[in-house]
Amino acid sequence: MPIVPVTPQTLNRAAELLRTGGVVAFPTETVYGLGASAFDARAVARIFEIKRRPAFDPLIVHVLDDAMLQRVAARVDERARALMARFWPGPLTLVLPKTPSVPEIVTAGLQTVAVRMPAHAVARALLERIGLPLAAPSANPFGSLSPTRAEHVYRALGESVDLVLDGGRTEHGLESTIVALEPRPTLLRPGAVPLEEIEEATGPLQRSTDAATPLAPGQLPTHYAPHTPLRTVAFEAVPQAQRAGCGAIGFRAAPGGYARAVALSPAGDLREAAAGLFEALHELDALGLERIDAEPFPEQGLGLAIADRLRRAAAPG
Ligand code: TXA
Ligand code: MG
């Protein structure tokens, strides 16, 4: 059983596995990551295999400090520095030119690398112990719901992972926000840092949905999807007769008449809603319901990332 609580001993064991080509799932402040040494192309290949992830979808590299950043990023300009000063360690990923040390499999052949400095104590303890950057995508099968608990990882990936470090439920519950700086500052994926906060530092960001801006590879329309069909819909528009046997995810309130309905934040707090989103999706998806109805979210602050995940979860596969 590779799922273990975090102790100095299990951290040492995880570090030893990572040093010798192993693949270890660990908690970060966003979601659980499936990590391997970023400099070990064979270990990274195992991540792709375990996740059944297409090779065109590059991974995020996690660094402990500036020294580790220098080993993976060839250039860090002033705009990147300003964002790092404000948001690192934390859930912001920056796309930067890569050094030759980063194997092509990590970046899917791109000359850029996506880097973030995690804030989570367990992620940091691992990075410190191995002294190497860790390539780590979210620890879920490609296209499915991201894991916010160790059990989600274990249920989806099981014995294929060498070790799962159980650090409890993740704080943000949504992946990092991804920003590319070249050719111009662009939002590649909305995430746990609200867009508005980043724009305070950068000015207006291009959106990767705009024509003629670089796309984040791997950001396919269907992603983060439960097995149960999901749609976003205003609950007022759903007749009672269409609720039986179905599940619902509401923002402030759980609507009546559904087999199971969840309110993500009765207080109307988007942080709380974001933190519970994947968890609610995992829970409802396990019930074998006919359909999941999710309430539309205001596309402001963290609502932007929540709405993005729901849109992708709802896209026909
Ligand atoms: O919060 C997170 O970011 C989590 C935790 C584990 O850190 N990781 C995560 O990784 O969400 P993943 O693999 O699910 O998302 C990585 C995405 C890719 O799908 C791609 O869209 C983008 O990051 N990406 C990676 N490298 C890139 C690059 N060089 N250029 C543009 N986008 C890149
Ligand atoms: Mg992912």
Image: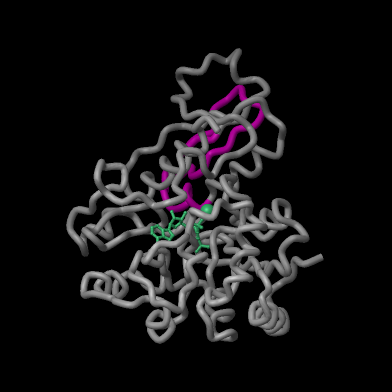
Please name the residue shown 64% across and 77% down the image: 18
Viewer-nearest residue: 78 or 92: 78
Q: Is residue 122 visible?
A: no
Which quadrant of the structure image shows residue 101?
bottom left
x then y, percent, for residue 130: 58, 84
Magenta residues, as a range? 249-275
Quadrant in which residue 182 is drawn? bottom left
Magenta span includes 161: no
- Left of 95 or right of it: where is 151? right
x then y, percent, for residue 58: 47, 59
Q: Residue at x 41, y 65 (%)?
A: 114
Q: Quadrant of residue 110?
A: bottom left
* Color encoding of the figure: one colour
> Outermost residue, left direction?
203
Placement of 82 over or under 145, stated as above or below: below
- Where, quadrant-wise, is the C terminus in this rendering? top right
Q: Residue at x 40, y 37 (%)?
A: 297
Name above or below for residue 261 compared with residue 66. Answer: above
In this view of the protein, can residue 221 be seen by the observer?
yes
Residue 100, image x and y in percent?
Answer: 42, 77
Q: Quadrant of the N terminus?
A: bottom right
Q: Residue at x 59, y 86 (%)?
A: 129
